[in-house]
Amino acid sequence: MTDMTEQMKKNFEQIKERIDEHKDDFEAIQNSVSQLNDKLKDAKEGWESARAEKGDKNEIAKDEETHQTH
């Protein structure tokens, strides 16, 4: 029983070491994903603003056209 417990501890330590070795990689990937998410959010907000501005211009043009014909 003791041999099995010792082997389990050894396996656990090996797994923990492997995780620790790659921890920086995981953090770098997480940072990259966060940056990409921020860029996508900015792009979406810019697109929404442009669409809203375009919509406002179209509405103003329609109002002016309607005003001119009446």
Image (cartoon, helix red, strand yellow):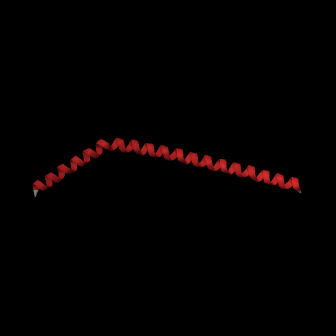
On screen, residue 59 versus residue 12, left or right, reads right
Q: Residue drawn 33% across and 44% down? A: 23
Instruction: Say which quarter of the image contains residue 2.
Output: bottom left
Front position in the image: 13 or 67: 67
On screen, residue 31 versus residue 1, left or right, reads right
Instruction: Please count the marks in the image.
Output: 0
On screen, residue 60 versus residue 35, left or right, reads right
Front position in the image: 24 or 56: 56
Quarter of the image where the C terminus is located = bottom right
Q: Residue drawn 52% across and 45% down? A: 38
On screen, residue 60 versus residue 10, left or right, reads right
Residue 29: x and y in percent read 40, 44
Residue 46: x and y in percent read 61, 46
Residue 12: x and y in percent read 22, 51
Instruction: Say which quarter of the image contains residue 5.
Output: bottom left
Quarter of the image where the N terminus is located = bottom left
Q: Residue drawn 29% across and 46% down? A: 19
Q: Residue drawn 47% across and 46% down? A: 34
